Image: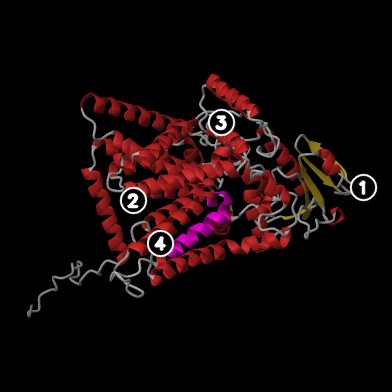
Amino acid sequence: MSGGGPDVSAPATESGAPAPAPTRAGRGFAELRAAAVDAWRTARPGERLLAGTIGGLVLVELLVALLAEPNNFDSQTYHLPKVEHWVAQGGLDFWPTAIHRQVTIPPGAEYLLLHLRLLTGGDHLHNLVQWAAGLVCLLVAARITAQLGGGRRAQLLTAFVLATTPMVVLQATSTQTDLICAAWVACAATLVLDGLSRRTGWGTLLGLGAATGLTAVTKTSGLIAVGPLLVLWGLAQLRLVRTDQSTPVGPATPGGGRRSWPVRGLARTVGGSVLILLVAAVVVGPFLARVTAEFGHPLGPPRLRESIPMERHDPASIVVNALRIGHTAFDTPLAPLRRAAAEVIISGAEAIGVDPQDRAITFGRELFPEPAWYPDEDRVAFPLAGALAVIGAVIALARPRRIAPERAGPLRAYAVVVLTAVLLHTAMIKWQPWGNRLLLYAVVLAVPLAGLWLDALLRNRAGGRRTVATVAALTVLATSALAGVLALSYGFPRRLVGTGSVFTTSDWDTRFLRRPQWADEFRWAATAVQDSGARRIGLVQQNDNWEYPWWLLLRQPDGGSPDLVALQSVLPERPPADPASVDAIVCTGSKAACAKLVPAGWRLEFRGYVGYALPPGR
């Protein structure tokens, strides 16, 4: 165009100047929004209902996560004190402590919390880490479903079943760590599935290494699934090497063909495997090095290595452990059913010569069975999601073409990996009352099989069979939705309605919903210590005591961290502080244990669970 008219290639602003071209991020967001609008416009009413329910649950969980103060039991003992120690000392090095889990349990989740703590100066956003992990689990599980041949409805069904699973609902508002671990495992799974049909590029290799390392540094039990996934990836890459004829390597065979195992492709697969392990080592290596230097073993002290992993691996013990884990995972409110099933397991165990309460296959002093139906973030069972996943896995193994005609091979291979992970878990992890949350990574991996099966149930049916299948699927989905809503409404220790509601309970009392009787005791002791003018304060506690309240109550006037030092230590190279070097002592748990460390002449006061000691004149 040769005239002096405006450039029609770009829109003009009011002044006549061309508007700036949209950035790549802006174009990406616009495309994403357009795709979402188009998907909603073309969705069927049932699909819209599924998507709306999922979105509603996620948004209400976000509200609870923002309103509720962190009140998870383990977080009070070691998750959040770990973060506070890092802030106080300005580094990640270990410290003297009576609670070994503060230093021996992998700290990946707490690394994320640390950033929020430094950014905000408090714990107001801590629950958002698990909420974000839950969202990642939903998105990645839907992507896995698509990779296994599922369409939009199958993806929505997968996300719906997972989003309404009570354990997911409750942990999405918590400072627990299981959803974070599950998210990293799911990321590894979807990257592995990418590698079943094409050669893996360098970016994906780095992603697999990062997912493996992040799983290891968050919760080592997640490696039980990542290991088989990486084996599947390696086998798939070797198969692609063997069948790849695009790059012939090596001399021709007598028949005129080329060798079926190209050296270049094989070397690339081996090199990729090494790269994955190297990246994982870079992520988890520093923590393992600190643990090894401190305890002489990368898995920590003997008490940690013997408390959770199975100590017996004979077939009979593994079967009994698997049955007990299954009993707890599939628990329901039907007490007669729970008792009858437990009696069968106990009688069967005794019949094959296994003590069902054997400490070598049972955590601590816990006793099987233990009710797990109640919507508690640490224990709640998942009978519906579990049953759907089991059905989906059986069909995926036996008749994969029925639910994914075009992806039967990858579907069966994925189901084998999920089954392998579950079997390895039951062979490696002792039964414990809160073991359901340790299985959360396996639930996230298995639910895509449930979504694919439900989708198949709703298609390819004729006449009365179609009606029965539709009614059955709708009943299952309605029950699942009810379970999710009830968990969000009445779950413990964060709920929308009833006693302990996030709308009616004070911030301080919310923190103590697990142990409400301790709320006033901690305040009473902290007030007495602060009024004394003490600056350096000694801690006396046992392995499972609450430490975090002291970090909140004893902060300095300017908001800085208090000077808290342990008067006991389970770290052999880090001795505790001398009681004579502190201005005051605060204690939890045993009064007798506290009295042993209080210097002569000090005044010791105790109320139930909490106590303090002050020197003469304070």
- Viewer-side label of 3, 2: 2
Q: Which mark is residue 238?
A: 4
Q: Which residue is mark 3?
A: 372
Q: Nearer the viewer, residue 489 or 162?
A: 162
**Span of residues in magenta:** 204-223
In this image, 179 relative to 448: left or right?
right
Q: Amino acid at mark 2?
A: Gln
Q: Amino acid at mark 1?
A: Ala
Q: Secondary structure at mark 3?
A: loop
Determine which quarter of the picture holds residue 472.
top left
Image spot of residue 97 (x, y percent):
74, 53
Q: Are marks 1 and 4 in contact (CB under 8 Å)?
A: no
Q: CA distance from mark 4 to mark 2?
A: 20 Å
Q: Which residue is mark 2?
A: 147
Image spot of residue 514 (x, y percent):
63, 35
Indicate which disc, 4 or 2, sits on the residue closer to the N terminus.
Answer: 2
In this rendering, the answer to whether 183 lies above or below 198 is above
In the rendered image, the residue lying farthest to the top is: 336
Q: Check disc 2: other Cα within 10 Å, few if <14, some if 14-19, many if 20+.
A: some
Q: Is residue 173 magenta?
A: no
In the rendered image, the residue lying farthest to the bottom is: 2
